[in-house]
């Protein structure tokens, strides 16, 4: 399982942004949907590494949050709310978000709870840096470009009323294709971390199955 603990940066100076973030993450397929846990913090639980990757990168794009990913077990049966849940993954998520707050100039994301956590964290940090360095002008173009889809850049140029060269330049400068090529790698490493957190017997069963 994966637990995400996400805490707002500089909440006193920028106001409460939790409602907007909850709305932005509402469509993600979670086992326990994101909820406000305490203060300006939210938590959610999921079992999909791809969902974790999507959530982390969406939150890092916003730029107003510290992100902690906890890997490991949770107490079952699951309650109806993450505020009532517990287990090693929750403890790890708390450790991770506290470490993310000390990340300095690097993207504020951390992964904890497994021997494989550092590998997954490293790829998420690299992807987060790509996202953080994009300009608003680049995002206005990128939101119209389907990564990896032939003809997408030409269609985006027509939709935006700009040249295909301008779209191509924005895609290349922003590392858009590289991001989407690396997202599955981040998910694979998160899944590996989850297997390692579960122990060698479970890892073997998952690999064989």
Image (cartoon, grey):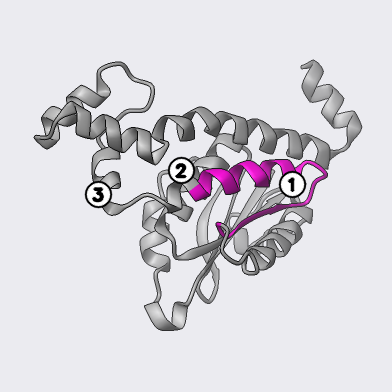
Q: Give how far apart the Cα atoms at labels 2 and 1 are.
A: 24 Å
Instruction: Please name which of the two marks, 3 or 1, marks the residue nearer to the observer.
Output: 3
User: Would you say the residues marked 2 and 1 are in contact, meaning their CB atoms lie under 8 Å apart?
Assistant: no
Magenta residue check for 97: no
Secondary element type, mark 1: helix
- First of labels 3, 1 by sequence position: 1
Q: Quadrant of residue 166?
A: top left
Direction from residue 199 to residue 154 in the image, left or right? left
Label 3: how many residues lie within 10 Å, few (<14), some (14-19) or many (20+)? few
Which residue is under mark 2? 28
Most extreme residue toward the right, as rendered? 201
Q: Is residue 109 magenta?
A: yes
Taking the spot 40% from the left edge, 75% from the top edge, the residue there is 16
Residue 100 versus residue 166 in the image, above or below: below
- Mark 2 and mark 3: Cα distance apart in space: 26 Å
Residue 51 appears in view: yes
Marks 2 and 3, the one that precedes in the sequence: 2
Give, as a single range, the part of the protein colored magenta: 107-129
């Amino acid at each position: 399982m994966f637990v995400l603990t996400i805490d707002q940066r500089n909440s006193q100076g920028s106001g409460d942004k939790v409602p907007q973030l909850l709305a932005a993450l509402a469509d993600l397929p979670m086992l326990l949907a994101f909820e406000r846990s305490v203060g300006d913090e939210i938590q959610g639980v999921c079992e999909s590494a791809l969902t974790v990757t999507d959530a982390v990168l969406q939150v890092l794009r916003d730029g107003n949050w510290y992100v902690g990913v906890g890997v490991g077990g949770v107490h079952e049966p699951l309650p109806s709310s993450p505020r009532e849940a517990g287990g090693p993954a929750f403890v790890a998520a708390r450790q991770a978000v506290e470490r993310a707050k000390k990340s300095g100039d690097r993207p504020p994301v951390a992964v904890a709870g497994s021997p494989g956590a550092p590998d997954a964290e490293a790829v998420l940090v690299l992807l987060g840096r790509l996202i953080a360095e994009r300009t608003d002008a680049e995002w206005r173009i990128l939101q119209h470009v389907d990564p990896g889809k032939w003809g997408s850049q030409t269609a985006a140029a027509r939709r935006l009323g700009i040249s295909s060269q301008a779209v191509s330049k924005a895609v290349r400068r922003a590392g858009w294709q590289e991001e989407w090529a690396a997202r599955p790698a981040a998910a694979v490493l998160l899944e590996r971390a989850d297997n390692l957190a579960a122990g060698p017997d479970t890892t073997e069963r998952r690999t064989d199955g």
